[in-house]
Image (cartoon, rainbow, N blue to C red):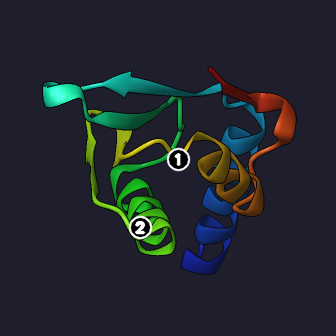
Amino acid sequence: MSKDLDEGFEDILAELDREEARIKIRMEMRRFGKPTTVIEGLKMNEKDMQELGSKMKRSLATGGTVKDGILILQGDHRENAARMLKEHGFSEGSIEVI
């Protein structure tokens, strides 16, 4: 297969993963009573998840990290995180805010 065809195929697979993903967004209280937003269920490769995490952190003006396929943001950003995921192509029905 040509490189262009292969990249197109990967784009299609990524889009299907976004549509099938069951994403859970919840808040956890961490050390010293600090709230954190935990986003799990994103079916993305590590590089794409890092990029998404960077965009979300910049937009929300907060810190955070990506560990083991889970995106963690400092503070309670559940509603804004859900909105941003919808803007990035994830369907509203696949996002569950707890």
Q: Mark 2 against mark 1, which lies toward the viewer? A: 1
SS at mark 1? loop
Q: Is residue 96 visible?
A: yes
* Neighbour tally class for label 1: few under 14, some 14-19, many 20 plus, Cα within 10 Å: many
Percent coordinates x, y for residue 10 in the rendering:
61, 58
Q: Is residue 69 visible?
A: no
Q: Position of residue 57 (x, y in %)?
A: 40, 65
Dot 2 crowding, Cα within 10 Å, few <14, some 14–19, many 20+? few
| Residue 45 picture location, percent across and down | 42, 49
Residue with the mark numbered 1: 77
53 vs 94: above or below = below
Query: Taking 45 as reference, is 16 left or right?
Result: right
Question: Residue, x 74% and y 47% (percent of image)?
Answer: 90
CA separation in Å, label 2 and label 1: 18 Å
- Badge 1 amino acid: His
Question: Residue beneath label 2, please?
Answer: 51
What is the residue that sits farthest to the left in this orientation?
32
Q: Quadrant of residue 22?
A: top right
**Which quarter of the figure is the C terminus placed in?**
top right
